[in-house]
Amino acid sequence: MDLTGVMTLQRRLSGMERDLAAIQAKLTALESEADAIEGDHPEEAALIRERVAQIQVIWEQLTQMLKERDSKLEEAGDLHRFLRDLDHFQAWLTKTQTDVASEDTPTSLPEAEKLLNQHQSIREEIDNYTEDYTKMMEYGEGLTSEPTQTEDPQYMFLRERLRALKDGWEELHQMWENRQVLLSQSLDQQLFNRDARQAEVLLSQQEHVLSKDDTPVNLEQAENQLKRHEAFLTTMEANDEKINTIVQVSDQLAEKQHFDSDKI
């Protein structure tokens, strides 16, 4: 029986419970009527009490049967909901593992930032599923740990599914961490490449200025060239700081064992 069938039976039982509540009221009225008849006809008292007792026994049996049936349906409903949730979670887990396993490597700074942001969104989604995973494992382990279910093939299969789910959940976290390292290093590389290109432009400009061989022919030209040279030295000192920073970043990336440290 599927979950829909279980829910249909539960609704029917709810209707029966309402019917039993009405019968309970009639049974109470019947007992009051029996007391009155006993007063008017004492000779019938024993027979009346016997029949009322029979009705009471049947009533209690019916009530107990209804409770047991309701309890079994509740358990069946919980199990079906659990299995349905388990299927949905497994499908999400497989899809998310595929997303994390993407081999896309950013080739530009905007792409590196985009992929890293997307990866962080996946982390937030994983965190949002943590509570569902915990509850699912607790319910499943409690269900499959009952001694009476040890050799049941269906419960043995369920235990295997839970074990695979646990392994997949742990694997997903490790995959995410590995991908996080790769994307973080890719972002570092793109930032370094940007700064290195800027440094190359600065060095090229400085080299161009130094390569000029303009010999002043008078005092005014000499003074102007001296001022330009002093300004150039000031600019070069500022550029030296930028270049030294790039060299330091390069050393730091190598120390962190960046995956592309040889090229950097």
Image (tube, helix red, strand yellow):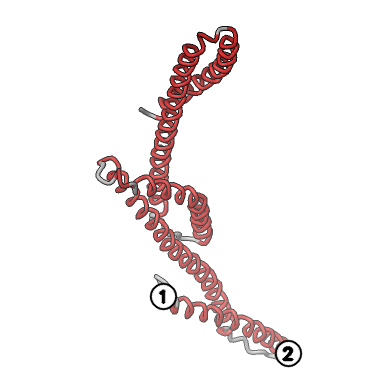
Q: Earlier in the sequence, mark 2 or mark 1?
A: 2
The residue at the far right in this view is 220
For the residue pair 198 and 214, the one nearer the viewer reads as 198
Q: Is residue 69 visible?
A: yes
Element assignment for label 2: helix
x%, y% of residue 110? 53, 58
Within the image, what quadrant is residue 153 found in? top left
- Specify whether 178 is left or right of 41: left
The residue lying at 55 percent from left, 7 percent from top is 41
Residue 242 or residue 219, whichever sits in front: 242
Amino acid at pointer 1: Gln
Q: Residue 229: give x, y in percent of width and height.
A: 66, 87
Q: Position of residue 190 (x, y in %)?
A: 49, 66
Q: CA distance from mark 2 to mark 1?
A: 51 Å
Q: In which quadrant of the rendered image does the N terminus lie? A: top left
- The residue indicated by pointer 1 is 257
Residue under label 2, please give it.
223
Under tag 1, what secondary structure? loop
Asked which quadrant contains residue 207, the reply is bottom right
